[in-house]
Amino acid sequence: MARELVHTGRRIRVFVDTLVTADGTTIRRDAIVHPGAVVILPVIDAGHVCLLRNHRWVVGETLWEVPAGTLEVGEPVELAARRELQEETGYTAAKWRSLGYLFASPGVMDEKLHLFVAEGLTAGPTALEPDEDLEAVTVPLGEAVAMCLDGRIKDAKTVAALLIWERLVAATLVSPTRGRLSDGQR
């Protein structure tokens, strides 16, 4: 494979890759190289999560999203998750769970999204960047899941985080704030 750098942006690099397929055909593909990101689902209590109303100029819409942000060079994902949660919501979390990672758009981009759930939240001040237009909103978990299913939530990372968490809670009878439920609590 040959790789030609065609653009360097603030956070991304764009390449044109030339590849040879198994049958010998030469093809060209665009590839966006991204440093990766963290995605955080803040769990307020057993029935509520924190979502953001985030104006996204690229799509010209205000979207419902979970807090997220790009990794800094060499930054451990766990530290980035803590940083982004505090910056965008003001919350700090006593308990963190990893939900693994997803690729945002693997046909053109290598961005890896590291998913986390933050629990045991303590409120504090936000530290928004000058270009961020965010509003943190507490939403019932059931309503957030319904918003994923009826199209009110259009952000893929948010849909993934909410539906994975909802399924884990339902499948394992895990209380988001207390751990596994005993038979007497079911």
Image: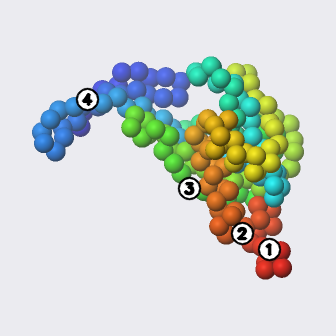
Whether pointer 1 and pointer 2 mark residues with C-beta atoms closer than 8 Å, the reply is yes
Q: Position of residue 52 (x, y in %)?
A: 74, 36
Report which residue position mark 1 lands on: 186
- Which mark sits nearer the N-terminus, 2 or 4? 4
Label 1 neighbourhood size at 10 Å, few (<14), some (14-19), many (20+)?
few
Tell me the number on the disc at residue 28: 4
- Which mark sits nearer the N-terminus, 4 or 3? 4
Report which residue position mark 3 lands on: 100
User: Looking at this view, is 169 or 5 the one in front?
Assistant: 169
Q: Position of residue 35 (x, y in %)?
A: 51, 38
Under mark 3, the amino acid is Gly
- Which mark sits nearer the N-terminus, 4 or 1? 4
User: The N terminus is located in which quarter?
Assistant: top left
Under mark 1, the amino acid is Arg
**Which residue corresponds to the image point at 65% horizontal and 62% vertical from the top-left?**
168
- Which mark sits nearer the N-terminus, 1 or 2? 2
SS at mark 4 in the image? strand
**Which residue corresponds to the image point at 70% horizontal and 46% vertical from the top-left?**
146
Q: Given the current orientation, which residue lies at the most extreme left position?
A: 24
Report which residue position mark 2 lands on: 173
Label 3 neighbourhood size at 10 Å, few (<14), some (14-19), many (20+)?
few
SS at mark 3 in the image? strand
